[in-house]
Image (spheres, coloured by chain):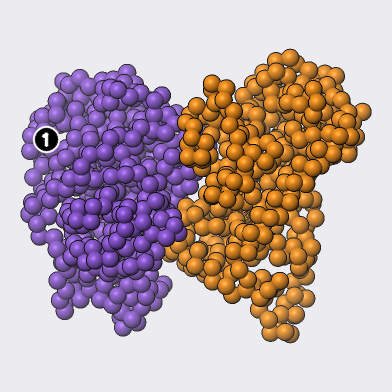
Amino acid sequence: MEFKYVPTVCPFCGTGCSFNLVIKEGRVVGTAPFRRSPVSEGKTCQKGHFAYELVNSPARLTKPMIKKGDGLVEASWDEAIAAVAKLGSYSGDDVCVVASAGATNEDLFTVKKFADEVLKTKNFTTPASTGIDASAGTIAGLAKADCIVAIGNIVESHPLVARRIANAKDNGAKVIVVDTFRSPTAKMATEFVKAVPGSEAAAIAEAGAFVEGKAVAVVYGIGVTFAESKIAAAAKALAESKNAAFCALPAQANGCGAILAGAVTPFCNAYSGKAKAFFVLGEDLGPLNAEFAVVIDSFLTSTAKTADVVFPAAVFAEVDGTVINAERRIQLVRKAQEAAEGVKPGWMIVAEIAAKLGGNIAYDSAEAVFKAAYPELSYDAIAKDGFLLPEKPASVEICDCDGCKCDGIATVSDEYPFALTTSATIWHGYGGIATLSANCRSLMREVSGMFVKMNDGDAKELNIMPTDFVKVSTANGSIVASVQITKDIDRGVIFVPTTGIGGGCIFILTRGAKAIAAKIEKAEA
Amino acid sequence: MAAKGDMLWAWAKDGNMLDNGECGGAVTALLKFALESGAVDAVLAVKKGVDLYDAQPVLITKPEDIAQCAGSLHCGTLLIPKIIKKYFDGANRMKIAVTMKGCDAKALYELAKRNQVNLDNLITIGLNCGGSVSPIEARIMIQEKFGLNPDDIVKEEIDKGQFIVITKSGEHKGIKIDELEEEGYGRRLNCQRCKTKIPRQCDLACGNWGVIGDKAGKATFVEVCSDKGADLVTKATGKAIETEVPSPAALSIRGKVEGAMLKLGDKCRNAQFEKLGDGKKRLDYIMEQTSRCIKCYQCIENCPICYCVECSTKKPHLVDSGAVNPPFMFHLIRYSHVADSCVNCGQCQELCAMDIPNALFMHALQMEMQEMFGHEPGVNMELPVLAYVEESAERKRLSDTGSDQIFNIFSEGA
Ligand code: SF4
Ligand code: SF4
Ligand code: SF4
């Protein structure tokens, strides 16, 4: 009987924990601690632990699909490749290339080449393309800080970074937390600075008054709203004024890699409505309204459902590759099982599509792609501890497109009396990462749909019980959600996680805003 | 003819194993013999993963592959029994020879009591264990305390109260464990509290304590702990291993080493438990520490006592689904279900995403229950306390006395 452990990197958040995939008879059957991980020492959060469940999910795509009439039908690879020809008629601003920042460097590097050389567009973006690039120090090093300013709910966005904040606190450090509610991170604080939803930047400046110490670190968990760069700018200013290290943690597993691969066009671009055609790898942007769209994914996402051609991609456990975590550590993703017949790694699919469109970005292996991107490294060289890329000065660029500019505090009214705040839930990621968590049954058992946290007094006033479902609405739209009634959130504030799960999605409510006025009504389940 | 209770020195007959195996290669030779002779279908042992600091389980079915399994890896903190349960159907469909340290052996018994593993199909070769160090902690210790590059180390061992490393250029360096641990380096905290140094629950208990004279480093001291173990040794002698009866001096030295380790274990227990305080103070401390739990489930997933398919922590009427931080009830369920049988394996602490000292709490509770009920987990097949509770009688007692506690775990003082 074949039985082995294959160490690999978690596909979820930017922390970059590792675990072993347990292989029995050639199939992934579980995870086991990889105590040798320089990042997480064998520990993971629930997402890492249950990540194996998505690998052999029955929902996996195994065949290409082509749009016929109103729906998608299965097709052969040859038919699907033939069907992408139309993509070649789009270039420049007419096309938008979007990848998940959870994709490997190998995939991202190939997609970038595809955008540059084949589609001749600069429109290459990922959810990590927020204009923020700051990664001072190491995650383990945080435990040695004597003062940490934690911005956002890092316990849920980057759990194994929060562990280091807890370590620092145990060692006597001051922990200053800025958040919009008494989140699990706020509960760890020695000083909690509560921010009014949408005015996080002001609260960050306020937090500066509490900073003291010789080894100060400012840590920000980047989310996926259009306000991220503004918050990061305030965090950076605070770090600079206090001579502190500044580390902004990308939401998705390979956020640092995405930026290094050149995905620097702001993510809001994908929602600007300017592009006529889309080329999407592993990201879920919601339903597209495009002339033509090609999607590469492992699951039939809401984006894939509206595509013209869909290609089935291998998941993290089926590919060799690399990702770069929040501390700039390149780590090896190892192939643990063979993908099903006809399911291929993203970079290979991109190369095949490129060939059809007259380009040539074919490589012999994942490592060949890696070496093209990082000539001085090899998979062997990074096999044990990964490779820490050199530190560089933090940079934050604020996007001032129409979508981003208007993002600010929630202006509540009689019609929309609540200020909605949003950040990560520990159970699910955003976009392409939520696709992964939605296919882990243990994560879905805990949280299978959108939820809203609200103050117990507000709930009482609206006669809402913990078992109720509610309709949450903003000027943009509404979703149905379950409720979590709590004292941890102020009256007049509600929390909806930045995710899309069970049919609902934060984007329907916020269109990318970090705070917005909302209302809540009791709904039928 | 070997018999239960025998003590012997053993070494591999095969010259290659003798030279390259740990302490004369007896364990490797026995494992190989068990496989070759058809006594087992497979050997489950530990091998080097990405490097010396990465212990991986390995299932060996071909005798020629036996060399894969490493000598003692002190960074090998993984727990084998739950792997047998999870991935080998509890050894119900195959016979397996397996190597175990003390906490493995105790965990195995607890799983066997719960019908999660089939002891009849297992041959257990216990390895004396002075404690193990988590890999990354070991690397940091070697760097900071030994002043050596952890990647240059080719071997590490615990001997005569020292943690010793050997570099690729042959340099030996040892530092007293006491000294390391006082500064927060060294063995896992549960290992420091451990008093199962020679795992006599196994069929054979093997190690290098009590191997002296010209056999030092060239033989393994084997204590035969069961008839199954005796049978394996009898059959293997002359074919796979050679044996010799150790001198009385060797027995006494082995006894002294074990005695010293047990004494150290007691000292560490006292020191660590004392810090927890008593009664309300202890409860407050536990509640404060567990309040940062993120519900990663690692403590449950890796605990050898947790085996329920229908885990109570997953029942929404007891613990809200999806709530983070989970309510204290999450931890209370673990305490009430596990404390009587906790074997202090340390997994729930080593793997806790938020570094909550879970094993310390559970072990402290277990010790109190052991004092109250006299049940010691992991040493034999005796059932735990809760198994003796006669439910209707207990319910009547609770209603008659108005008490709501089966055991008063948090009583003030001793
Ligand atoms: S903290 Fe992030 S990287 Fe680590 S296991 Fe959780 S999701 Fe994965
Ligand atoms: S409670 Fe912790 S220390 Fe005790 S047996 Fe379970 S995992 Fe091991
Ligand atoms: S391992 Fe730690 S953080 Fe995870 S559920 Fe258990 S106590 Fe909570």
**Horizontal relation, residue B32 to residue B351: left or right:** right
- Front one among A281 and A490: A490
**Horizontal relation, residue B10 to residue A231: left or right:** right
Residue that extends furthest to the top in the rendered view of this protein: B15
Q: In which quarter of the image is residue B387?
A: bottom right
Above or below A173: residue A37: above
- The residue sitting at 10% across, 42% down in the picture is A275
Give the position of the N terminus of chain A as an image quadrant. top right
**Which residue position is annotated with label 1?**
A122
- The residue sitting at 66% across, 78% down in the picture is B404
Shade representing chain A: purple
Shade representing chain B: orange
* Image region (quadrant) for ligand 2: bottom right
Above or below A444: residue A73: above
- The residue sitting at 40% across, 46% down in the picture is A140
Residue A43 is situated, as x and y percent measured from the top left of the image, at 48, 47
Give the position of the C terminus of chain A as an image quadrant. bottom left
Residue A258 is situated, as x and y percent measured from the top left of the image, at 24, 38
- The residue sitting at 38% across, 42% down in the picture is A16
Chain letter of mark 1 equals A
- Front one among B389 and A69: B389
Residue B291 is situated, as x and y percent measured from the top left of the image, at 47, 65
Any part of residue A446 in sight? no
Helix, strand or loop at label 1? It is: loop
Q: Does the residue labelled 1 lie within 8 Å of ligand 1?
A: no
Label 1 is placed on what type of residue?
Lys
